[in-house]
Amino acid sequence: MEKIKMNPIVEMDGDEMTRILWKEIKDRLLTPFVELNTEYYDLGLPHRDETGDQVTIDAGNAIKRLHVGVKCATITPNAQRVEEYHLHEMWKSPNGTIRAILDGTVFRAPILTGMIPAYVSGWKKPITIARHAYGDLYKATEYRVPCPGTATLSFRGTDGTEFSKTIYEFECPGVLQGLYNKDSSIESFARSCFSYALTTKQDLWFSAKDTISKQYDQTFKLIFQRIFDEDYKAEFEKAGITYFYTLIDDAVARVMRSEGGFIWACKNYDGDVMSDMISAAFGSLAMMTSVLVSPDGNFEYEAAHGTITRHYYRFLKGEQTSSNPVATIFAWTGALRKRGELDGNAPLVTFADKLDAACIATIRSGTMTGDLACLCGKTGVTSVAFLDAVRATLEKSL
Ligand code: NAP
Ligand code: MG
């Protein structure tokens, strides 16, 4: 069989166990079939440290140029990692750096195999969470109020506008918090959500609490509606998908009664909470994918899990580990499929679909890594044995 040709994508290598899996996936499942064309950036912690983290910035800019990237999990250093890797600095999270360059929204979705029943019995299709990863509680200013007194919320504009409102006349000690968000960030969030809904042909739900938060959450609701009406309504109709806004409490009730198969856009805090709820309810963190979508149509695919440090330390001792490579394989197929779609490269899209299907068929046939095996009463195989089984299934389908 002749290898499939492709235009370049950005490849970002990473750390620890996932770096080991990265190479195994390429060697066993990709390069035998595809003439992999990637611009390679080594985001492994040692190389980030050598380059003063410039390599992360270069990778982010490369995604802007090539529009598609695939990233391996990377270590976000803390004090212990600074010591372990003798770092010059406690470098920032690569995901945060790349997100800031692309101004994107992260979409997380579970990979369903039919083998692990969802805790919510009605959920048959994946639920994708889109979290607005900017502002609100995560950039709040807060302090304790020590004694009775008056709290005010004030603003001084560069044009001389001034507002001041009483928040509360404290008659005893208490707490106080100031939140903000900005129209430009909410607009980018809305555009990323609409564009991803079109890409994946799924309905989009957006929830907030505008009945209570009549300015703050209302602003989110109005911006979403305006952008939808101006730029996406016609395309949604053509694609046969819908957008609707509802209150967060109503959304939660509807999600529970739904069968899945839609995107749920959430404000920052809601998304933080709901994405963990969704991934836990679908069974396994190792089976969650994640894609960063920028409002101007750049896509970066990765697994939602980290570098699986505990397995890596066992691997270093010479043990064969049973780390689950599926979410990392899906990151690759997501990127290859998107590349294929953008370029009209049908063989590449078909290959990505077949590799996804081979992973799922392999698991359904009973061959799986330990994390899944223990959920369905089977015995797990090593990562390498699993990859070989996927390859055998894939070869049959090609
Ligand atoms: P983690 O790597 O996601 O692993 C936590 C635990 O979850 C593992 O010990 C393992 O449990 C299980 N697990 C996760 N993925 C798995 C897989 N593919 N197959 C089998 N089991 C899996 O999280 P962490 O240990 O908290 O973080 C490790 C490093 O990853 C940190 O340095 C962190 O900064 C980084 N991180 C990176 C990203 C990213 O790049 N997107 C995201 C999160 C964390 P058992 O040990 O019980 O088997
Ligand atoms: Mg969380």
Image (cartoon, helix red, strand yellow):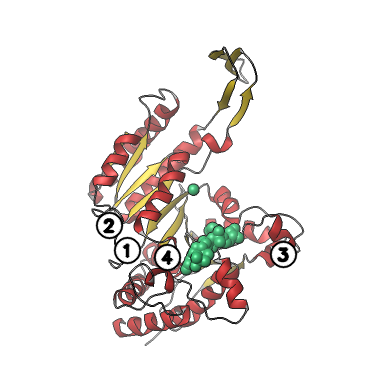
Query: Which residue was labeled with disc 4?
Result: 339
- Image coordinates of residue 222 in percent, x first then y, are 37, 30
**How far apart, in angstroms, are the residues tagged by discs 2 and 4?**
25 Å
Residue 306 seen in the figure: no
Pick whichever of labels 4 and 1 is earlier in the sequence.
Answer: 1
Categorize mark 1 by other alpha carbons within 10 Å: few (<14), some (14-19), many (20+).
Answer: some
Rendered-image quadrant of the C terminus: bottom left
Pick whichever of labels 1 and 3 is earlier in the sequence.
Answer: 3
- Image coordinates of residue 5 in percent, x first then y, are 43, 77
Three-letter amino acid code at the position of disc 1: Leu
Query: Which residue was labeled with disc 1?
Result: 112
Pick whichever of labels 4 and 3 is earlier in the sequence.
Answer: 3
Circles 1, 2 touching at the beta carbon (< 8 Å): yes
Q: Secondary structure at mark 1?
A: loop
Pick whichever of labels 2 and 4 is earlier in the sequence.
Answer: 2
Three-letter amino acid code at the position of disc 4: Arg
Circles 4, 1 touching at the beta carbon (< 8 Å): no
Residue at 25% x, 55% y is 121
